[in-house]
Image (tube, rainbow, N blue to C red):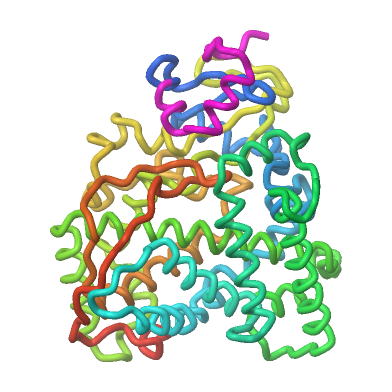
Amino acid sequence: MKLPNGPKTPSLVQTFQWINSPMTYMEDCAERYGDIFTLQLTEPVVMVSNPQALQQMLTSDTKEFSAPGDPLFESFVGKNSVITVSGEVHRRQRQLLMPPFHGERMRSYAQVISKVTEEVISQWQIGQNFDVHSAMQVITMRVIMQAVFGLYDSPHAQELEKLLTLMLNRGGSSPLRALMLYFPVLQKDLGPLTPWGIFLRRRSRVYQLLHAEIQARREQADSSRTDVLSLLIAARDEAGQPMTDAELSDELMTLLTAGHETTATALTWVLYWIHKFPQVREKLLQELDTIGDRSGSDTSSNTILKLPYLNAVCNESLRIYPVGMLTFPRVVQQPLTLCGYDLEPGTRVLGSIYLTHQREDLYPQSKQFKPERFLEKQFSPYEFLPFGGGAKRCIGDAFAQFEMKLVLATILSNLELALVDNFDVKPKRRGLVTGPNRPIQMVVKNRRQVVSPTPEAVSG
């Protein structure tokens, strides 16, 4: 079988390039080899960025392609996570997890999101610099703790928040951790002071806390609770079976890590872009101020969700530097042709979200931040796919966008912020996702005297 062309350097060299600077490496390969190329990493991987090829791949799950679990995430979220399981087990887990994050269930968390955001930003002082990513992590962690567990400022919540922050900040984003994820042979516990040993002990304590909370919630059996854990405990699959404790623990870990860190990073980027370009900020404030002038009965989370320019700003931020740079892997099930290449069963294929979002034929002047492009054109799910697609599309995509918009509306309606410096910020690898290549510092210039979307109003 002849795979698509790709770099001829040794596999180990390619893997190190991929770990060190994935976005640059993908762009170099795309410039040289086009819409489809092969990387020789720990195994050969075919990478595509052509929307038609992505559509073929993502709409052919279980037919031409299988969607296996991704073992790279297993050390973080376990073997029972919706990310790491496949086939019927994945379909079952997904069906059980979806309801709390869509429709009215999701919108019931509007008051939580606004309340948490207002509490955090009330502590920011005028003239005081703050690290945007750290601040957004505080907000998204508290939101997810409240939404998932109904816990806020409890001893368990505080310990979980501290442990997860340490795991993600001090381990999950380092090049060494990425190296360990790609080479399982390096995942050795050499003691409590070694990187992997520290990670394992923190993870073990997190799971202890999760198991304790699951047991306590099972014993309470309170049908009036609406937090995600209570809903998942009550959920039943088509055979009438509930999730096991092991499944619940891994799914909670998935929500607490993936659902918190990715949204914090996305918010960091969008606040950077809004304040990088004053005209974007002014246009967005004008749109938000039209909400503030309305009565509370009309000001609802639905209204904020549908604001066209706010939506365009969020989408453009997710486009230009997507937090997830790749789709989850697919494996060819039967002989097929993709971008003119004949692929045999067993071939591993990845969709490059990053490269697709950088295509000049889709996004002219793709390196420029231009929210208007999302007002002028409707992009297909295979041209704009910040949350992946197909059977493995992120289950929290609607919640993440909902949270982003409410957090931004609350911050911008209450505070006048500015970047400490106007130097460009670029993306870099943070574990298995991407983030800013340096801390983004902002300063509170003033408090805005407008009628802001209050928690009561936003909850509509």
17 inside magenta stretch: yes
Residue at image coords 27%, 54%: 273
Give 431 or 53, whichever is nearer the viewer.
431
Q: Is residue 118 left or right of residue 182?
A: left
> Looking at the image, how many numbered discs can be counted on the residues?
0
User: Residue 126, located in which quarter of the rendered image?
Assistant: bottom left
Q: Which corner quadrant of the image does residue 118 belong to? A: bottom left
For the view shown, which residue lies furthest in the front direction? Answer: 193
Q: Is residue 38 left or right of residue 228?
A: left
- Front residue of 276 and 203: 203
x 34%, y 69%: residue: 408
Relative to residue 169, is residue 256 depicted above or below? below
* Quarter containing the C terminus: bottom left
* 184 in relation to 337, above or below: below
Position of residue 211 in the picture relative to residue 454 (left or right): right
**Which quarter shows the N terminus?**
top right
Q: Is residue 328 visible?
A: yes
Residue 282 location, x and y as percent? 15, 65
Instruction: Residue 2: say if magenta.
Output: yes
Rendered image quadrant of residue 207 = bottom right
Instruction: Give the dominant element type of the magenta stretch: helix, strand or loop.
Output: helix
* Residue 165 percent coordinates (x, y): 58, 64
Q: Along the horizontal axis of the image, is 368 left or right of 212?
A: left
Magenta-drawn segment: 1-28
x%, y% of residue 361?
A: 30, 29
Residue 193 horizontal/vertical position (percent): 73, 54
Q: Residue at x 35, y 53 (%)?
A: 315
Judge by depth and name the residue closer to the eye, 51 or 421: 421
Asked if one can make out residue 312 in the rendered structure from this viewpoint, the answer is no
- Compared to residue 324, the image places residue 448 above or below, namely below
